[in-house]
Amino acid sequence: MKKFHVLTTALAAAVFLAGCGGNEAGDQKPRVAFTSMVSFGDSLSDVGTYAVGVVAAQGGGHYSINGVGATGLLWTNWTEFLSATLGLAAPCAAETGLNTIQAVLGAPPVPATFHDASTGGTCTNYAQGGARVTNPVGPGNATLFNASVPSTYSDAIGQLTVPVQTQIANYLSHNGGKFSDGQLVTVFAGGNDIFMNAGGVLAGVETPTQAVGAMTQAGTELAAYVNTQILANGATHVVVVNLPDVSLTPYAVGAGATAQGLIKNMVVAFNTALQAGITASANLVYVDAYAASEDQAANMAQYGLTDVSTPTCTSSSSLVCTVNTLIPAVAPAASGAAATAANTYEYADSVHPTPYGYRLLAELVSEQLAIKGWL
Amino acid sequence: MKKHSIASALVATAALCGAGAAQAQVAGQVMVKLGWNKIMPKVRSTELSAPALPGSTIDIKSASALFFTATYMITDDISVEALGGLPYKHDIIGTGSVQGVGKIGSIHQISPTVLLQYRFMPADAPFRPYIGAGPTFAKFYGSRGSAALTAFTNPGGPPTTIGGDTEWGATTEVGMSYKIDKHWFVDAALLKTFINTKAQLSTGQTTKARLNPVAINASIGYAF
């Protein structure tokens, strides 16, 4: 019996050792100790430049479905998802304001105001809706408004559209001309150069060849800003996101096959020039949002998407879209509930993602940062 | 006659040695071993299920731990062995589209195994190779996630955790023991286990992994 006792003791010990130990989060600190995130770009990175005046009155400010938790997700814009992943406070707009044309919209303009280091603030997201790479006039800029052209009425809102070149210059002049090691610097632009040039072709004031050439120039210029203004000024953690395939957006699809083909060529021209122009650097991660956007459209289920063609907002611009202005298919069943059904839709309006669409971009960027060893 | 007596003495001595050896591995004997075991999973995992970035797969790295066995000799040749030990802690590495991300987590595992063994050579031989086979019960628990895992599964959200599982598998082995004296022996074995598992993330995605680890161990044993 003693021999059997030895056997049973061993087995009991094995079972005992298998006992406890729960599944835990583990170390959630990024491998790089980031202290802040600095963003340059357009509406796709904007976290509230225009959340003032008439826009604020409608509960807007993000180019998506507005409102914290509107669709049950914690954040709205990809820069917000990303900064939370880095363990940082939510990003805020470095500059706010609206050049609203009061005669058209009945509301007064709101003066442009900085909230960054120049005014003792801590906001470092310089991205602005309507911003182009270099040209200071982008979609929604009040100078585009023409009382005799109905298609320009939306420009009466008066977006500042400070271009990326000036956004970077503003940062540098307000921060001693330098970036620091602890900063993650994100650059994501080019979409408004597509819209302005494609619009020029549709209006007959620009040839398709000129439009594609303008995109090559914009891509080359953005690459130069990254090289000479960001990397050369001490940034050691830079993320450049290329342009998603804008030809897949409801805006491009709705413009017809010819325009859609042109837009695709323009996007490719921009991305090719951007990637070719950026100096290879260990301090830079280039994220291919173009390939990801095509894969999302082709393999929706893989990404948890069911719709990549229907805008969920009933407002023409998602800048003022909230849970109260959603199409019936995704509107919350009860007042006050989250529009969780929107979390399988890619688009909020004809070009901007839903919060879920932004989350997918944040996943892609985060994955690339993790592979780089920064996260 | 003198030569004969010398021969008799040699035979008698040999017989004595044989008698001593017979203490080691004969029917009814119980033996225990204590040693070090290294488990080397040979992983092939499926892609993390949707919704997820495509092509995310995992590898599970080797781990070592103290192990012990208790063996009962049913006959001079056939034995049954229970194998247990301290938990193994394996690092989980991202592969596929997340190749290069490095460690994305870790998980503990314990895999008690019962083996039916056949031992070659006579019971009193000092050197006895053996083969064995039997069931393995694996319990995966005590996982840890990481900032990197959360980053590409739930950016900006609550940390992603990894759910373990319990699994049954089958183990085969080849080994050998070498007797040092009446009670003590040394032992080494090579084990191959056939086992699959499924890990589920707190964000809902799953990955099925064929683990099929090879294990090598060395131990010192005592025969009662």
Image (cartoon, helix red, strand yellow):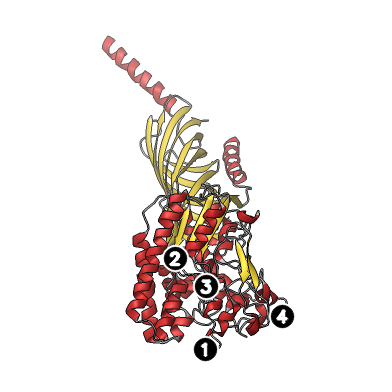
* Dot in front, 1 or 3: 1
Instruction: Identify the residue position indicated by label 4 in the image.
Output: A334
Circles 2 and 3: CB distance less than 8 Å? no
Give the residue at x 57% y 82%.
Answer: A154
Q: CA distance from mark 2 to mark 4?
A: 35 Å
Circles 1 and 3: CB distance less than 8 Å? no
Mark 4 or 3 closer to N-term? 3
Q: Is residue B117 visible?
A: yes
Q: Secondary structure at mark 1?
A: loop
Instruction: Identify the residue position indicated by label 3 in the image.
Output: A130
Q: Is residue A240 above or below residue A195?
A: above
Instruction: Identify the residue position indicated by label 2 in the image.
Output: B54
Q: Position of residue B100 (x, y in %)?
A: 42, 52
Q: Is residue B164 visible?
A: no
Residue type highlighted by circle 2: Pro
Q: CA distance from mark 4 to mark 3?
A: 34 Å
Disc 1: CA contacts within 10 A as few (<14), some (14-19) or many (>=20)? few
Residue type highlighted by circle 3: Gly
> To which chain does the residue with label 3 belong?
A
Q: CA distance from mark 2 to mark 3?
A: 32 Å
For residue A98, which quarter of the picture?
bottom right
> To which chain does the residue with label 1 belong?
A
